[in-house]
Image: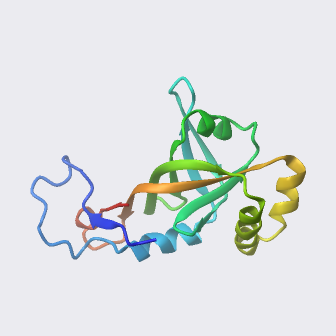
Amino acid sequence: MSEPKVGRPHWPDAISNPSDDLSALKPWAWAVERLEKSHNYWISTARPDGRPHMMVIWGIWWKGAFWFSTGPKTRKAKNIVAQPHCIVGTEKANEAVIVEGSATEITDRAEWRRMGEVYDKKYGGKLLPMLESSGGSVFRIEPKVAFGQDEHAENYVEAATRWTF
């Protein structure tokens, strides 16, 4: 995956005249580190009638995308089938990374095995037997845009970052 384009988020109420100096923006590596290390993630999907649905999940940042598993009868799985656009956020709001993208269900069992090895290394346990016995689903969220906000930055507003893929 190539590096995404870095820039400022559209934030008209916070910055009336943003600086041309982009040195405070976060590098993509900062976001990837948080995407890889987060233990819990928030996922937001839309119900078929448009109402939002948010849930906590486990997952992995792998191969330039976010991967997770869930049962095919869960609300989030049903929502993704009807409307693949979704948002995933890391667990720490003070160093937030928010990824907007589209989810695709992965049906290739060889890809499940490769993903399962990475997932099991992160969380322990055996994901694949559980997936196969429960009829679970694996989804990959391809990022379109991501945002980073770091409260620890010297200038929080100047450090708010948008990455476009």
User: 129 or 30: nearer the eye?
Assistant: 129
- Residue 133: x, y in percent? 90, 52
Left or right of 79, for residue 145: left
Image quarter of residue 140: bottom right
Residue drawn at x 11%, y 68% as measured from the top left: 20
Image quarter of residue 17: bottom left
| Tally of numbered discs | 0
- Residue 36: x, y in percent? 57, 71
Left or right of 30, for residue 76: right
Residue drawn at x 29%, y 67% as measured from the top left: 6
- Residue 70: x, y in percent? 73, 48
Tell me: residue 70, above or below residue 8: above
Residue drawn at x 51%, y 62% as measured from the top left: 92
Left or right of 131, for residue 25: left
Residue drawn at x 75%, y 72% as measured from the top left: 117
- Residue 9: x, y in percent? 27, 55
User: 21 or 154: nearer the eye?
Assistant: 21
The type of colouring in the image is: rainbow
Looking at the image, the residue that sits furthest to the top is 49
